[in-house]
Amino acid sequence: MPIPTLILSAGGVLVARTGSAPTLSSFVLRTGCQWEALDVAGLCPHSTAHDRFQEWVEGGLWQRFWQEAVNCYDGLKGLDWSFLCADGSMAKAPLAKEERGRNLTDRGKQGVKRSLLTDAKGIPLSVVVAGANINDHLLLDQTLRESIVERPVPSRTYPQGLCLDKGYDYELTRQVGAEHRLSLAPAHPR
């Protein structure tokens, strides 16, 4: 099955379509149902839908989908580049692959760290996934570089700030902020 094209529906929602049928993978992602529910509902074999999902991941569909959604939002509402926010979170990953690391705060179980960058309104611009044992500040440069859309160059007229928590209070963070021409907002004391 070919990688689907992205279309904007009449309701202003991006939809991935192959031919004229909406994808069942999108249905699973939107509803949160398990893949096996497709079998029970008689929609299609779950293995077929999951295979297509994996093909689309490898083909970059979800990356393109996210980029198009952010660009549409920017055109309609406008991204707010005046202040960016970055933070990391950890999650368990019991079926983790080699790029995942041991989560030292969870007795060494496999886990992932997600480093997220948003604009001032909370629109996600970048996500970097690494092993759970990586400190947040070590992922900051990569998170800033991998924005799904190009970040405008900050200027005196249009400066950009970066809000971070205490987990980023390192000299490396200040160097990365300076390299990206961002003014860092101090974390509030706890």
Image (spheres, rainbow, N blue to C red):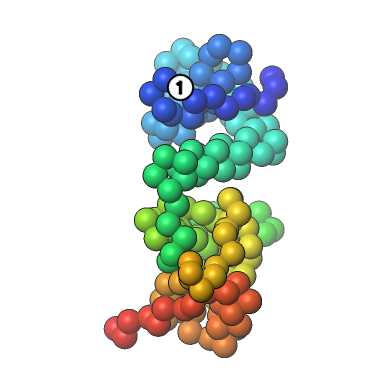
Which residue is at a point 41% across and 28% down the rendered structure image? 12
Above-or-below relation of 9 to 176: above
Which residue is at a point 43% across and 66% down the rendered structure image? 83
Above-or-below relation of 58 to 161: above
Locate residue 51, reporting x and y percent.
64, 28
Q: Is residue 19 left or right of residue 35?
A: right
Q: Is residue 79 left or right of residue 190?
A: right
Above-or-below relation of 10 to 89: above
Residue placed under numbered mark 1 in the picture: 9
Disc 1 is placed on an element classified as loop
Which residue is at a point 62% across and 58% down the rendered structure image? 146
Looking at the image, the residue that sits furthest to the bottom is 171
Would residue 189 be seen by someone viewing this image from the given angle?
Answer: yes
> Which quadrant would the N terminus be assigned to in this image?
top right
Which residue is at a point 60% across and 72% down the rendered structure image? 180
Label 1 CA crowd tier, 10 Å (few <14, some 14–19, many 20+):
few
Q: In terms of depth relative to the viewer, which is nearer, 133 or 124?
A: 124
Q: In terms of depth relative to the viewer, which is nearer, 28 or 37?
A: 28
Res. 128 image quadrant:
bottom right
Q: Amino acid at mark 1?
A: Ser
Locate residue 32, reporting x and y percent.
40, 35
> Which quadrant would the C terminus be assigned to in this image?
bottom left
Q: In terms of depth relative to the viewer, which is nearer, 85 or 112?
A: 85
Locate residue 36, reporting x and y percent.
48, 26
